[in-house]
Amino acid sequence: MRQYLDLCKNIIDNGTWVENERTGKRCLTLINADLTYNVADNEFPLITTRKSYWKAAIAEFLGYIRGYDNAADFRQLGTKTWDANANENQAWLNNPHRKGTDDMGRVYGVQGRAWRKPNGETLDQLRKVVNDLTKGLDDRGEIITFYNPGEIELGCLRPCMHTHTFSLLGDMLYLTSYQRSCDVPLGLNFNQIQVFTFLALMAQITGKKAGMAYHKIVNAHIYEDQLELMQNVQLKREPLPLPKLEINPDIKTLEDLETWVTMDDFKVIGYESHPAIKYPFSV
């Protein structure tokens, strides 16, 4: 929690104003941020200086694991996070590759589960990593990437958190996640939750112990219409103790995650927070 607040203060104190072409807004921007999450001790990085809606974050990542490409499927899991980018992003609405209402195109989990090879076949990156880790193998290439430069125009949004690298030392599993761009007031806590939960889930289904998760952000920013709320509300509040994440121990395989798992299989214990803050969202 403290590292999140320190990053926010660092952006405000040392950031540079940059015009964002996609949103038409200015961002106070900082290059290079590193966050760490102690998954081994279950220190769940849920923001406490405002109410954070963790279920939507986990539901979204479960949709990535399943390779979903439609906002309706994400809504069925319990999150509306893709509604705007699928249906309100004017560049995507004008894109001839868009298939219709709620279509997201070839983004995120589609690339992770069905990366296209030159011969027309698809590669399941996630399955390869799960199989290796289950066997206790680490070829120093246990990588899942959602960023496919050759298919950027086939999706509604370039992936922000784009690559996940797993590392195995003995029976201890680590994760390093890379993010090209981060809306710190709104998006970062989603991303923190997802990095933490991804390592916890992968350790559980491969029979390994979860260690540390490392979260590397290239472009961390606060939009101009978010700055006052961050400075005068959120940063004035004292952080509260971090909660714990409980995952149903019956989740034992990738197939479980692909089929029957719902948000009822996740619980957060001991979460206390300050009131919610309604930050503006930029599409």
Image (cartoon, rainbow, N blue to C red):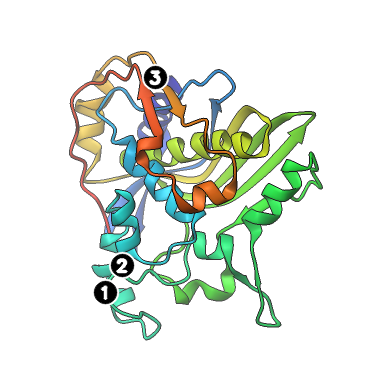
Instruction: Tell me the quadrant of the picture where the C terminus can be found.
Output: bottom left
Query: Going by the image, does 3 lie left or right of 51?
Result: right
Q: Secondary structure at mark 3?
A: loop
Asked whether disc 1 touches disc 2, contact meaning CB atoms under 8 Å apart, the reply is yes
* Residue appearing at x 31%, y 38% in the figure: 185
Q: Amino acid at mark 2?
A: Ala
Query: Going by the image, does 276 lie left or right of 156?
Result: left
* Residue appearing at x 42%, y 66% in the figure: 69
Residue assigned mark 1 = 101
Q: Secondary structure at mark 1?
A: loop
Residue assigned mark 3 = 243
**Toward the viewer: 147 or 201?**
201
**Toward the viewer: 174 or 245?**
245
* Residue appearing at x 40%, y 42% in the figure: 58
Residue assigned mark 2 = 86
Residue 56 image-quadrant placement = top left
Q: Amino acid at mark 1?
A: Thr
- Tell me if residue 241 comes above or below residue 25 in the rendering: above
Q: Amino acid at mark 3?
A: Pro
Provide residue 111's location: percent of width, then percent of height.
55, 65
Q: Secondary structure at mark 2?
A: helix
**Mark 3 closeness class: few <14, some 14–19, many ≥20 residues within 10 Å:** some
Query: Going by the image, does 152 lie left or right of 134?
Result: left
